[in-house]
Amino acid sequence: MPAFSGQLVVFGFASFFALAFAVLMVVQRTPVRSVLSLVVTFFGLSVLAVLLAAPFIAALQIFVYAGAILVLFLFVIMLLNLKEEAADEDDRPVQRTLGLLVALALGGLLAGATLRAPAPPRGTPSLSSIPSPDEIPALGRLLFSDYLLAFEALSLLLLVAAVGALLLSKRKFE
Amino acid sequence: MSPTLAAALEGAAKIAFVWACVLGAVLPNLIWVERRMAGLIQDRPGPNRVGPFGLFQAVADILKLLMKEDVVPMYADRLLHTVAPLILLVPAMTTFAVIPFGSTIHLFGRDISLVVADVNIGILYVFALTSVGIYGLVLAGWASNNKFALLGGLRSSAQVISYELAMGIAAISVFLAAGSLRLQRVVEYQASGTFLGFLPLWNCFPQAIGCLIFIVSAFAETNRVPFDLPEAEAELVAGYHTEYSAFRFGMFFMAEYLNLIAASAMMATLYFGGWSLPYLHLTGIFGSLASIAVFAAKTGFFIFLFVWVRWTLPRFRFDQLMNLGWKVFLPLSLLNLLWTGALVLWGVI
């Protein structure tokens, strides 16, 4: 593996931004800025997907997460006009401890999985040397054959969630 | 010359060409065309003082914006207020990377495909960038700390998200027919045969509903009349850019026009055969140059349509806009998808 390559630099920048803004999202006290930090994190992750020669995943990451879901977050925060985070978090010591424990457990799990993962193949394949068959038809074929049941179950789940949300919000207004 | 260097040079040349055309030729002339057309439609001369026929009006407009005072409101969020126009402008400028502006040209012993980056995610890239642009509008509204700006920003995000859905489903039908998300492939598919034996295989014929939905949604996505509710001046002063002045206002202005140009180019590419001419297959270097001209002419027509509609139609109400998007366009675009699927299944297209 060469010590210095263009890909390594891009990887470094993308992961740095993803991590730094993930931290910022938690630390930030203004909810709007928290959401924006998360957007930058998603951008970093999508750059990593491009480096893995998966531009489709990268585009979906931006289109669905950054473009749709987080805009809705922003929308809600603005409608509720949340300027500052409520400063009553010290009143909830149990939640804080529990949250810390869960975070540590999850972090440990992820670190363990990363360490146990098989080593990547030696040498750095450059983007152009990876044979890039059109990933989209392959993905579509998989979704509609091997994973059809899971795919349909997932769409049903989303539909139920949407109907449920509608029902809950309707009841509140009446 | 090494192949990597040649490829890099080729890419740089294409980027330079596209930006020179868009920023240097189309954008300033568009400002002039819009103002002169307004004059024509409203039965008055329009700007005719700067240069012959007022052709240098755009230069005067831009210089004026550059020299005005740049005001940031006292209680604004300074950082986000500064960044917001950039968030809008950068995606608007990078959309053009995936739009094929011509066929393949043979130059210096290389076959050069006339598109900056013919990536396999094609239109998904465009949609992803459009959705990033929403942040610019929303943040401009929020960071200004002004109720009119905030309402304008909220309206624009609601509007863009609603219409992106119908537009996306309409676009899916196009890729169902072409069998690829790659835009160069979409154009080649449309140039490849005929529909019903005599019409060109442009997607606007078999998918007339999808085409209509895409065009109308594009008006909503670019915040143009009759869907310019985010900046409805009678109720919201100037919407999300109420608190912007000087060149930062100019950036909003520029982004709006760039989005308009990109939307026109997308319409020509997805539904009207892109750079291809019906029934004719021009080859050689002149064929390639002609394909660029054909693409420019088609895009130009849709830009003209945008301007024409702006000065002809009144504005919708916000509830009408939302009803149209969710209750009419969304089901219609799903029907269009079903119809296109049936056509593909029966081998008609």
Image (cartoon, coloured by chain):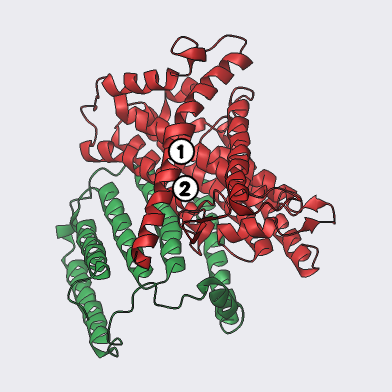
| Chain letter, disc 2 residue | B
* Badge number at residue B22: 1
Any part of residue B28 in sight: yes
Q: Nearer the viewer, residue B230 or B82?
A: B82
**For residue B248, above or below residue A100:** above
Q: Nearer the viewer, residue A168 or B344?
A: B344
Secondary structure under the numbered disc 2 in the rendered image: helix
Give the amino acid at mark 1: Val
Give the amino acid at mark 2: Phe
The chain assigned the colour red in the figure is B
| Chain letter, disc 1 residue | B
Q: Earlier in the sequence, mark 2 or mark 1?
A: 1
The location of residue B337, given as percent across then percent down, is 69, 59
Q: Is B119 left, or right, of A76 in this rendering?
A: right
Q: Quadrant of the C terminus of chain B?
A: bottom right
Callouts 2 and 1 close, C-beta under 8 Å: yes
**For residue B246, above or below residue A87:** above
The location of residue B94, given as percent across then percent down, is 41, 48
Q: Measuring 21% from the left and 73% from the top, which residue is drawn there?
A: A98
The location of residue A73, given as percent across then percent down, is 38, 52
**For residue A115, above or below residue A138:** below
Any part of residue B323 in sight: no
Q: Residues within 10 Å of mark 2 (few under 14, many from 20)?
A: many
Residue B146, by quadrant, is top left
* Badge number at residue B96: 2
Q: Nearer the viewer, residue A56 or B148?
A: A56
Q: Measuring 50% from the left and 52% from the top, which residue is drawn there?
A: A169
* Badge number at residue B347: none
Q: Residues within 10 Å of mark 1 (few under 14, many from 20)?
A: some
Measured in 3D between alpha carbons, the distance from the residue under mark 2 to the one under mark 1, in whole angstroms, is 9 Å
Q: Are marks 2 and 1 in one subunit?
A: yes
The chain assigned the colour green in the figure is A
